[in-house]
Image (spheres, rainbow, N blue to C red):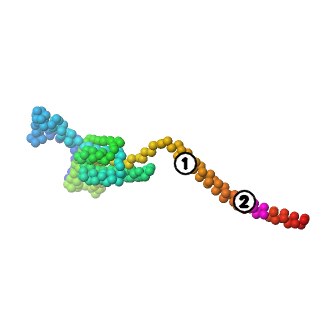
Amino acid sequence: MSITPGRLSLGGFRGAVAAGVAVLAAAAPACQKARGPHSSAKDQAPAAPAAVADKGSAQPPALQAMLAARKLIRTGQVAIEVRSYEEAAEQVARLAESHGGYLADAQASRGAQDRRRGTLVIRVPAERFAAAYAALKGLGKVETETVSTQDVTKAYADLETRLRVKRDAEGRLREILRTRTARLSDVLEAERELTRIVEEIEQVEGERRYYDQQIALSTISAALHEPEAVIRAGALAPLLEALRDSLQVLATSAGALIYLTVLLLPWAAVAALIWMVVRAVRRKKLRREG
């Protein structure tokens, strides 16, 4: 299929775009592989001798470079018992700032016996994660602690590959629109395709920025709580419990008596009135008979 400078059909244009993207995707690995034997002296710098590597480091330079290129997301969780929640929370905020980070989230509540507890989330630079985590554990009695690491090296590399291919496709589309003439419908179709590719590029760039933020800043979640009051049962505990139960029964009985009194009071008034009327009638009757 050929594309003439004079006119570009819709089918030919779509075929050219698809062929260009496919050629770029297929040629990238081949070019990378073929570049090895003919690369510059800078790219083919000789590896350091084993003896030199052993003296400078316990790991070969290639392994060191591979480890340095890894993309890691580190998170930590720790539960600490502290004497005062307010003081500990302020220390956590100051600790985050002193390590170049910030307080990302904070939640607090009151439990039994007015004891404060809450969870604070801080973000610190990845290289300060270990120091910040150790400082957090020094705030009180550590009950539980967890550190996890997520390796996103492969996912990050896939994003970069997708981004490179889509940018190459965008460049080819812009070049075709700039140097070729076609019908208005073909131009509109090309612009729609270009818009779609640009949107996909923005989406991939957003995903990469998210990874960059998660990699650059580690997350530490600290659950703080004040110590619970411990009450030991003594010898008088059964008596105190019986006294509490008896007071509860007394209060319940008094409430029932009051309820019954209020319920029967109107009927008692009616009965008293009837009794007074009957008594008055009987007196009058006795007077007549006497």
Question: Sequence order check: which comes first, mark 1 or mark 2?
Answer: 1
| Residue at (23% x, 50% y) in the render | 167
- Residue pointed to by mark 2: 268
Quadrant housing the C terminus: bottom right
- Residue pointed to by mark 1: 244
In terms of secondary structure, where does tag 2 sit?
helix
Does the rendering let one see residue 22?
A: no
Percent of width and height locating residue 204: 28, 49
Residue at the extreme front of the image, as rendered:
235
Q: Nearer the viewer, residue 203 or 47?
A: 47
Q: Is residue 274 magenta?
A: yes
Percent of width and height locating residue 79: 35, 45
Q: Amino acid at mark 1?
A: Arg
In terms of secondary structure, where does tag 1 sit?
helix
- Give, as a single range, the part of the protein colored magenta: 271-276
Q: Nearer the viewer, residue 134 or 112?
A: 112
Q: Dot 2, crowdedness within 10 Å: few (<14), some or many (≥20)? A: few
Does the rendering let one see residue 232?
A: yes
Q: Are marks 1 and 2 in contact (CB under 8 Å)?
A: no
